[in-house]
Image (spheres, grey):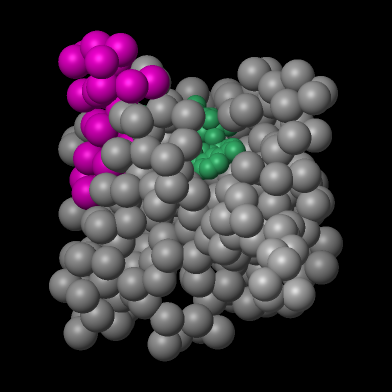
Amino acid sequence: MTNNHGRLAGKVAIVTGAGSRSEGVGNGKATAVLMAREGASVLLVDNMAERAEETLAMIKEEGGGASVFQADVTSADDCQRMVETAVERYGRLDILDNNVGMSAGRTVVEVSEEDWDRVMTVNVKSMMLASKFAIPQMVKDGGGSIINISSIAGIRAHSSTPYTASKGAVVALTISMAADHAADNIRVNCIAPGLMYTPMVAGRLSDANREHRRMAAPMQTEGTAWDIGWAAVYLASDEARWVTGVVLPVDAGLTVTTPATFQRLEHLA
Ligand SMILES: NC(=O)c1ccc[n+]([C@@H]2O[C@H](COP(=O)([O-])OP(=O)(O)OC[C@H]3O[C@@H](n4cnc5c(N)ncnc54)[C@H](O)[C@@H]3O)[C@@H](O)[C@H]2O)c1
């Protein structure tokens, strides 16, 4: 087992979208691998089982505990079976990482009604459905941690208005759920990944675009899915036992700047 510090030892996690859409490591895959590395038993949920099988192979190679469950998280029945399966296989549920997300359309003028509904269903309704069945189980088990994957697009205008609207809804969902379930010792937090390099965007980026994204944030380094995975490990762990309702940007500082941040103004010099 690689670098196992046991930060999630004994915990049971569900990661949705635990495969990656193409070669390489996406957020769901990295999160599942790191949670298993930290000692969690992980249910790898994906609607394309073969993608989750690749994640399983990585975890198995490191000696971690995980198994695949094929499910479409936009289906209530599938979400219910997903939670039941985690409990059947591992005995309890401590962590739900709601990672599935997609983009479609650009402006409200251009987007079709079907695409709008699809983005809202895949990005927002799926998190409601998964949580609806996970929370009663977590209550039985004495508490838990839910991590919703938003985006800096949820707090800034980005490339697609439907995507931004859905990711903003994930932020609102997170803070309201955090309040609703705090008394049951269920923490609900949200990660807002920045302009990182993952299979989700790799196919659409020229080398120049990729470099532009890297240089856009003040740290001027390229983010990867592992950066999101480590943030999720922290939020899932008992180290974060007093942290709920947080929107955590993992973006090399992009969202703390404005175009004027590094301008030296005469009157301030
Ligand atoms: N990559 C980035 O630059 C970036 C930036 C900000 C936010 N995000 C967010 O990160 C999340 C995804 O990250 P990823 O890198 O794991 O994406 P990915 O697309 O590589 O992998 C997601 C997996 O989800 C599965 N999936 C899709 N629809 C599903 C459904 N309905 N039910 C079950 N599984 C389904 C796919 O088969 C795929 O294997 C999304 O919420 C995305 O919006 C990514």
- In the image, the segment drawn in magenta is 106-129
Of residues 84 and 115, the one drawn nearer to the viewer in this rendering: 115
Q: What residue do we see at 42% from left, 81% from top?
A: 243
Residue 78 appears in which quarter of the rendering?
top left
Of residues 94 and 87, the one drawn nearer to the viewer in this rendering: 94
Vertical order, 51 against 248 (above or below): above
Of residues 21 and 108, the one drawn nearer to the viewer in this rendering: 108
Assign the magenta stretch its main secondary structure.
Answer: helix
Place of residue 115 in the rendered image (x, y in percent of width and height, measured from the top left) = 28, 17
Vertical order, 149 against 189 (above or below): above
On the rendered structure, is 237 left or right of 103? right
Vertical order, 66 against 48 (above or below): below
On the rendered structure, is 219 left or right of 246? right
Any magenta on residue 118?
yes
Place of residue 57 in the rendered image (x, y in percent of width and height, measured from the top left) = 71, 38
Q: What residue do we see at 71% from left, 58% from top?
A: 263
